[in-house]
Image (cartoon, rainbow, N blue to C red):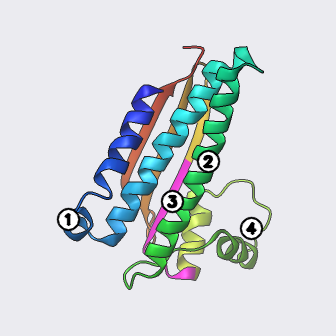
């Protein structure tokens, strides 16, 4: 939990640092905040799971309210990232509604998950160069988050990252 909060806080420290956006660009700066919000939200979720056995106590209410706040913050940083990337001449980001529309047009409406083949078909229809796919799962006493970046033309894996964080039971 502490590591998640620390990494998130580090991103929030670096993001607004004078000259950082000028050095890395507006998109990378927005991504820094979004990555920070993911880690901070994970920390909030872990804090809530640690306090779960104290339901109704001040510690539990504090954890639940902070966790809800981190979720709201996560949404707002995603919207800022989406806005920043959408305004870019080099990057086009599909909204969830646009994704669902393309899934519908390609005969995949109602799909619970989007696999690589489905994502490649959507990429071809939307002329996307790159696809981001990911998943998260609770495995015993741990939470695992996986993110994969694929070439939108041939599906070639460009990069991947995994994060495994212990939960309260660990």
Say what secondary structure mark 3 lies in.
Answer: helix
**Left or right of residue 53: residue 17:** left
Crowd band around label 3 with a 10 angstrom C-alpha radius: few (<14), some (14–19), many (20+):
many
Q: Quadrant of the C terminus?
A: top right
Crowd band around label 4 with a 10 angstrom C-alpha radius: few (<14), some (14–19), many (20+):
some
Which residue is found at the position 57% from the left and 28% from the top? 46
Q: Compared with residue 116, is residue 5 higher up or lower down, i.e. above or below?
A: above
Question: Which residue occupies the extreme bottom position in the image?
Answer: 89
Which one is earlier in the sequence, the residue at label 2 or at label 4?
2
Crowd band around label 1 with a 10 angstrom C-alpha radius: few (<14), some (14–19), many (20+):
few
**Left or right of residue 50: residue 1:** left
Crowd band around label 2 with a 10 angstrom C-alpha radius: few (<14), some (14–19), many (20+):
some
Q: Compared with residue 104, is residue 133 higher up or lower down, i.e. above or below?
A: above
Which residue is found at the position 49% from the left and 46% from the top? 38
Which one is earlier in the sequence, the residue at label 4 or at label 1?
1
Q: Which residue is mark 3?
A: 77
Q: Quadrant of the rendered structure where residue 94 is?
A: bottom right
Percent x, y for residue 116? Answer: 55, 59
Q: Which residues are magenta?
A: 126-134
Asked if disc 2 and disc 1 are in contact, CB closer than 8 Å, the reply is: no
Q: Which residue is mark 2?
A: 71
Comparing labels 4 and 1, the label whose residue is closer to the camera: 1
Which residue is found at the position 49% from the left and 41% from the top? 40
């Amino acid at each position: 939990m502490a590591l998640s909060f620390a990494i998130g806080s580090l991103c929030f420290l670096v993001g607004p640092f004078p000259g950082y956006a000028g050095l890395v660009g507006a998109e990378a700066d927005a991504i820094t905040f979004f990555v920070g919000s993911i880690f901070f939200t994970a920390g909030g979720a872990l804090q809530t799971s640690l306090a779960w056995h104290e339901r109704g106590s001040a510690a539990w209410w504090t954890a639940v309210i902070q966790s809800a706040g981190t979720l709201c913050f996560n949404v707002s940083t995603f919207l800022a990232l989406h806005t920043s990337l959408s305004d870019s001449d080099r990057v086009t980001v599909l909204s969830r509604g646009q994704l669902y529309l393309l899934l519908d047009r390609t005969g995949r409406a109602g799909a619970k998950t989007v696999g690589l083949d489905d994502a490649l078909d959507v990429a071809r229809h939307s002329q996307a160069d790159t696809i981001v796919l990911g998943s998260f799962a609770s495995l015993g006493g741990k939470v695992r988050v996986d993110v994969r970046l694929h070439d939108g033309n041939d599906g070639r894996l460009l990069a991947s990252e995994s994060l495994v964080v212990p939960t309260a039971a660990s």
